[in-house]
Image (cartoon, rainbow, N blue to C red):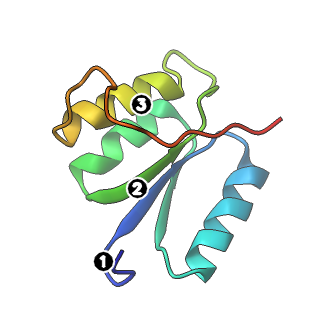
């Protein structure tokens, strides 16, 4: 990834976890945009392009992280049925 222009989308509703991950990614040279909700995350790709998305699967609200992941797959031209491998993670 080219850290000068490639952005990481981080979708995390826990503010402490989001701050820690964003700080670490930025320190490693990966500019990061943080969204605290699925709705907020779905608005960001309309303004910016991301090379990687890290999505909390268990987001609260009407939409969860799976909804965000499915939408991103469709947006970026993959099959739309999640046949493409997507990295995933969760915190306990």
Are circles 2 and 1 on residues that touch, CB within 8 Å? no
**Alpha carbon distance from label 3 to label 2:** 13 Å
Q: Look at 26% across and 58% down and name the residue there.
A: 49
- The kind of secondary structure element at disc 1 is loop
**Alpha carbon distance from label 2 to label 1:** 12 Å
Work out whether mark 1 precedes mark 3 in sequence or the reverse, and give the earlier one: 1
Work out whether mark 2 precedes mark 1 in sequence or the reverse, and give the earlier one: 1
Q: Look at 33% across and 80% down and name the residue there.
A: 2
Can you identify the residue that label 3 sits on?
68
Residue 39 lies, in percent from the top left, at 43, 31
Q: Position of 60 compared to 76: left or right?
A: right
- The kind of secondary structure element at disc 3 is helix
Q: Look at 34% across and 49% down and name the residue there.
A: 44
Work out whether mark 3 precedes mark 2 in sequence or the reverse, and give the earlier one: 2
**Alpha carbon distance from label 1 to label 3:** 22 Å
Quarter of the rendering occupied by the C terminus: top right
Q: Nearer the viewer, residue 10 or 52?
A: 52
Foreground tag (2 vs 1):
2
Q: Look at 32% across and 41% down and name the residue there.
A: 43
Can you identify the residue that label 2 sits on?
52
- The kind of secondary structure element at disc 2 is strand
Vertical placement of 17 versus 3: above or below? above
Give neighbour class at mark 2: few <14, some 14-19, many 20+ (Cα, 10 Å): some
Label placed on residue 61: none
Can you identify the residue that label 1 sits on?
5
Residue 29 lies, in percent from the top left, at 51, 82
Vertical placement of 5 versus 12: above or below? below
Task: Work out which residue is located at the far top of the displayed protein and give it.
Answer: 62
Give neighbour class at mark 1: few <14, some 14-19, many 20+ (Cα, 10 Å): few
Vertical placement of 81 versus 18: above or below? above
């Amino acid at each position: 990834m080219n850290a000068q222009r490639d952005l990481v989308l981080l979708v995390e509703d826990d503010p402490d976890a989001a701050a820690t991950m964003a700080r670490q990614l930025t320190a490693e040279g990966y500019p990061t945009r943080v969204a605290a909700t699925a709705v907020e995350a779905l608005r960001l790709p309309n303004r910016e392009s991301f090379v990687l998305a890290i999505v909390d699967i268990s987001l609260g609200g009407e939409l969860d992280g799976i909804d965000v992941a499915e939408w991103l797959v469709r947006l970026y031209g993959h099959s739309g049925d999640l046949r493409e491998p997507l990295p995933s993670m969760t915190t306990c």
